[in-house]
Image (spheres, helix red, strand yellow):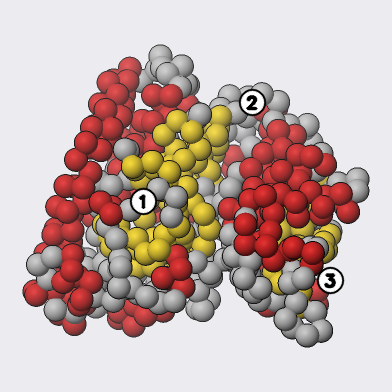
């Protein structure tokens, strides 16, 4: 790295500090736990849940239930009305809007200044330090980053609060040094739609992009069409890296190659409105380094127990095992206490602690006992695309019942960016790959006794974009339910066809 030489030493120090912290990660988590309990004892939530009596993890498990967003919503509504010391003792004036799979239209996640500094800002800094360590010749700091996540809603209504997608608030409240590294004079993140982003950034010196693969592809495609060019490097010749999150990159890899001239680097991060949890440590290793010294205390519930609401054996970082699937439970310095984030993870290494995201606690198909996870689905789709020279823009899948409702199959509704020449071959490859990845799926597919061969519904170009805007009105920012254990999404899609 030949520019901003003072940052050379700064990021080397940050990288070394991050790795050194893993020599005493359990101690750091324990110290963080007692800090959070002390802070929580000053709040309404702490009073309601006997925080003064909590002297150990066992006490925490005794007095504080594991909660979903719906269960803590009354506390959050109280905070949005302007009350303080509800979930966290310092002032909460930010609420990050998150569109997920809850039973409410959207979630307003409280964000404290401590959470911004101890978690989001610190994790972004560590992510950049990792990237620069792995790419010492990078010139990313010469240009700008564009974040393609969400919008900011300026409606304050009758109270002093800001409700909006988290990334916009992240940049607004950024500390001084990231503004120096990644100037954002255009305030691109505050624009309300992709069309305005196109106008502002088509002539900027973009070196890196942050966002979800799905939304980023939509943005890049629109930009290429508007500029009437063949690939994105004709617009941004020095683009070098895509920091992605939110979903697997594998199904989108081929499509990215079709719209770039020079290979770009890809680095995964695991973040959400609730926190920044993990980051890819090495380009040769797709697993993610769990961030254990970033203001979040972690707990883990084996997925089968979580599905049964059995929380008698909740584990901390010192108890986890490689190869088991856990529902992720977080306690943050914004006052999310034992909050079920909705994701399932699997540990792949314990020194340091590395994970891979398996799926969502609510996004799976297990109607016939097949236990199909999001990881299975995306790996199989990527394999089928590779073998049939095709690529996918978006998809969803769920069960299709036969007459007796005891037997059925999976229906895959897929929007292709490049359709396979032979759809039957695509389905066959997808099915066989799922069998090889998932023993339960393979058993249920045996001789079609329980589960028949998948069926495919091919959707026209831009279907999901139009459908989601029509039904969910997310202003162009959305989360597609890739797997569902019912036909609620598939039936609605067929009505819209």
Residue at figure coordinates x 75%, y 77% from the top left: 407
Crowd class of label 1 (few under 14; some 14 to 19; many from 20; radius 10 Å):
some
Q: Which of 187 and 45 lies nearest the eye of the viewer?
A: 45
Q: What element carries label 1?
A: loop
Sequence order check: which comes first, mark 1 or mark 2? 2
In this image, 207 relative to 324: left or right? right
Sequence order check: which comes first, mark 3 or mark 2? 2
Q: Which of 88 and 196 lies nearest the eye of the viewer?
A: 88
Q: Position of residue 183 (x, y in %)?
A: 43, 36
Task: Quadrant for the C terminus, please.
Answer: bottom right
Instruction: Using the image, tell me which numbered label, if any, was put on residue 497.
Output: 3
Crowd class of label 3 (few under 14; some 14 to 19; many from 20; radius 10 Å):
few
Residue topped by disc 2: 263
Task: Quadrant for the N terminus, please.
Answer: top left
Residue topped by disc 1: 321
Q: Position of residue 19 (x, y in %)?
A: 28, 32
Disc number lying in front (1 or 2): 1
């Amino acid at each position: 790295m030949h520019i901003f030489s003072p940052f050379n030493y700064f990021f080397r120090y940050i990288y070394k500090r991050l790795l050194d912290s893993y020599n005493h990660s359990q101690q750091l988590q324990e110290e963080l736990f007692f800090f959070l309990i002390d802070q929580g004892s000053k709040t309404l939530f702490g009073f309601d849940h006997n925080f003064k009596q909590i002297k150990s993890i066992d006490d925490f498990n005794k007095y504080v239930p594991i909660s979903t967003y719906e269960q803590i919503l009354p506390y959050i509504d109280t905070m949005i009305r302007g009350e303080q010391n509800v979930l966290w003792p310092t002032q909460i004036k930010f609420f990050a809007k998150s569109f997920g799979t809850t039973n409410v239209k959207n979630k307003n996640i409280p964000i404290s200044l401590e959470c911004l500094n101890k978690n989001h800002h610190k994790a972004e800094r560590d992510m950049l330090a990792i990237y620069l360590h792995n790419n010492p010749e990078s010139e990313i700091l010469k240009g700008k980053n564009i974040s393609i996540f969400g919008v900011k809603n300026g409606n304050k209504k009758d109270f002093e609060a800001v409700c909006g997608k988290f990334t916009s608030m992240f940049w607004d409240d950024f500390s001084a040094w990231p503004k120096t590294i990644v100037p954002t004079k255009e305030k691109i993140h505050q624009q309300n739609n992709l069309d305005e982003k196109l106008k502002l950034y088509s002539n900027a010196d973009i070196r890196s992009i942050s966002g979800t693969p799905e939304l980023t592809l939509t943005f890049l495609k629109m930009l290429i069409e508007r500029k009437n060019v063949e690939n994105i490097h004709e617009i941004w010749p020095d683009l070098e890296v895509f920091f992605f999150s939110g979903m697997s990159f594998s199904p989108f890899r081929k499509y990215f190659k079709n719209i770039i001239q020079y290979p770009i680097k890809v680095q995964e991060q695991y973040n959400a409105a609730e926190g920044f949890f993990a980051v890819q440590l090495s380009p040769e290793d797709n697993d993610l380094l769990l961030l254990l010294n970033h203001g979040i205390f972690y707990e883990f519930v084996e997925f089968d127990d979580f599905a049964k609401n059995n929380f008698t054996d909740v584990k901390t970082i010192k108890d986890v095992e490689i190869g088991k699937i856990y529902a992720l439970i977080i306690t943050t310095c914004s006052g999310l206490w034992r909050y079920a984030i909705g994701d399932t993870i699997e540990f792949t290494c314990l020194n340091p602690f590395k994970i891979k995201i398996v799926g969502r606690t609510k996004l799976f198909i297990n109607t016939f006992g097949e236990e199909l996870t999001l990881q299975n689905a995306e790996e199989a789709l990527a394999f089928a695309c590779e073998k049939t020279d095709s690529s996918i823009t978006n998809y969803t899948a769920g069960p299709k019942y036969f007459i007796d409702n005891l037997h059925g199959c999976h229906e895959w509704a897929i929007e292709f960016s490049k359709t396979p020449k032979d759809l039957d071959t695509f389905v066959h490859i997808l099915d066989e790959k799922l069998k090889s990845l998932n023993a339960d799926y393979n058993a249920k597919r045996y001789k079609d006794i329980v589960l028949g061969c998948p069926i495919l519904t091919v959707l026209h170009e831009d279907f999901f974009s139009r459908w989601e805007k029509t039904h969910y009105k997310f202003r162009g920012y959305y989360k597609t339910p890739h797997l569902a254990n019912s036909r609620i999404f598939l039936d609605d899609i067929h009505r819209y066809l």
